[in-house]
Amino acid sequence: MSKEISTAEKLAPVRCALLSVSDKTGVVEFAKGLHARGIALLSTGGTAAALTQAGLPVTEVGQHTGFPEMLDGRVKTLHPKIHGGILARRDLPDHVKALADHGIVTIDLVVVNLYPFRETVARENCTLDDAIENIDIGGPSMVRAAAKNWKHVGIVVEPADYPALLEALDHHGNALPKPLRFDLARKAFAHTAAYDGAIANWLTARNEEGVAEDFPQSFHYHGVCVQTLRYGENPHQKAAFYRDETPPAGSLSTFMLSQGKALSYNNLADSDAAWECVKALPATACVIVKHANPCGVAVAGNALDAYRKAWATDPVSAFGGIIAFNGVVDEAAATAISEQFLEVLIAPAYTDGARAVLAKKPNVRVLEIAFPKTAGDSSILDFKRIGGGLLVQSADNRTAAPDTWRVVTRKTPTADEMRDLVFAWNVAKYVKSNTIVYARHLQTVGVGAGQMSRIDSARIAALKAQQADLTLQGSVAASDAFFPFRDGLDVIIDYGATAVVQPGGSLRDEEVIAAADERDIAMVFTGMRHFRH
């Protein structure tokens, strides 16, 4: 008997819906669909006005509760006839009796999205009072109430779910199946959690006068699980990929996978390194990444030449790597690329001919990412997990412009050297510290990454050049941080570099400058360091 009752309760039809939305996208069409299915409509304020204007029969919440909206709209749904109708369990006789005793009608569907707090605080001139007035109170209360009572009530917070909901009502006799109700409840709790997290992040980064501080006292991250991954860095580790609630334009997480297997944890990490590096370079550039480090980078007149120059830097390391372009990949480039083994190919666009060539390599993951139209947002945060905590910093999305660089040696870089110094400096920013990058003719000819000693990085980069049969004579070199002693600079010059770019800032800068003058090379200081750990 209990089983039969339970089944009947799960399939109880929706008879009354409450709609109260700030984002009115599609709400009129959705309400028309509910009305056409015989569902009574309750609504508030602006939503009620929109539905009435559309010719729909709507009962305004004030009429329903017998209590008018008040305090400039701060109080309208906070009433037992609303929350009792949402929270009552239909399977408990005491709850059903309480509703009958107090003349409360059950509300079977709640359609609510919240005051635009995040949109408000995103405005440059937003004040503390503006932010406070856009903190929703009744909305989250209704959302949480409906989600808590998900076995009996449907809760919709995303306009994108309206069509699927109407379809479900049609397939289940105006009822909502249990799996759908539970899925909607999960979305609802995530929705209110993200909303409250945004409020906490914004408010705890300000004082009572609304003056902003650098970081919030309480930090909340909200992301959406895009996919669970086969495993993490190693097969014994579990992993998942979460996308930011509002990912920055042109970031890796906005990719479209047009071909190939699902991306792995390491694929995603390496792809991000490749894409961020190639975005920082002039067109047409190619970046090849292996284990999160660029192993070959080049700029050329077309995608094919850029790829060939990048590959030539370190063919051994490039095998099985990630290849990224900041321009269109054409058929010629795709043909050359497809002759090698690679994991992922990234570009803003591909010609039809390129897609046809790549289709013959079905295991290659082909990503398309819309190139950002503007420079990176300096407010973006970067995270690093440590044991029991989280390190948070502003993203390293700035670099010192070449016109602010300072020539510190007697010798000034030639125009060609300066062009290569800018290129090498942009690449070095994306190589793990300690970093030394040799470059020549807009091509990396040696990359030394992630060493404890800067001298070792310089030597490893030179070894890479020798292995690839590339000369360092006449090259330039970039160091992501200053030279603490002259010995690292001497090693670079011994290998053939004629110009060096570095941040400067060492206690021994004068010693290093004197060494550069002694060896008759040009050196410039950028005034900005780019450690990458």
Image: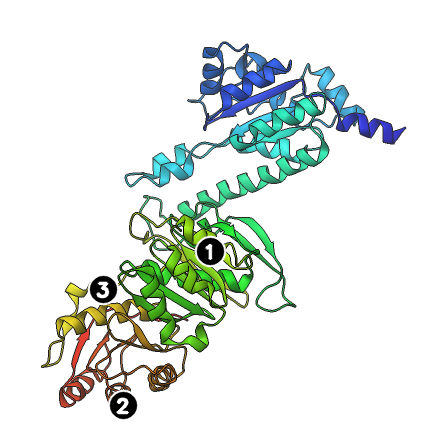
Please state the horizontal and vertical placement of residue 204, each as a whole percent of the image.
41, 49
Please state the horizontal and vertical placement of residue 182, each as a whole percent of the image.
67, 37
Q: Secondary structure at mark 1?
A: helix
Please state the horizontal and vertical placement of residue 497, each as a whole percent of the image.
23, 83
Whether residue 117 is situated above or below residue 272 in the rendered picture: above
In this rendered view, identify the residue nearer to me: 226 or 525: 226
Q: Which mark is residue 400?
A: 3
User: Which image quarter holds the N terminus?
Assistant: top right
Res. 272 in view: yes
Tell me the residue at 47%/68% (across/down). Answer: 340
Which one is in front in this view, the residue at disc 1 or the one at disc 3? 1
Q: Which mark is residue 172?
A: none
Q: Which mark is residue 487?
A: 2
What amino acid is labelled 3 in the image? Ala
Task: Give the mark, 1 or 2, whose residue is nearer the N terminus.
Answer: 1
Res. 218 in view: no
In this rendered view, identify the residue nearer to me: 415 or 17: 415
Tell me the residue at 43%/64% (across/down). Answer: 337
Whether residue 130 is situated above or below residue 301 in the rendered picture: above
Q: Secondary structure at mark 2?
A: helix
Left or right position of 120 against 482? right
Q: Which mark is residue 357?
A: 1
What amino acid is labelled 2 in the image? Asp
Crowd around label 2: few <14 · some 14–19 · many ≥20 (10 Å): some
Left or right position of 114 against 327? right
CB under 8 Å between discs 1 and 3: no
Tell me the residue at 18%/88% (across/down). Answer: 515
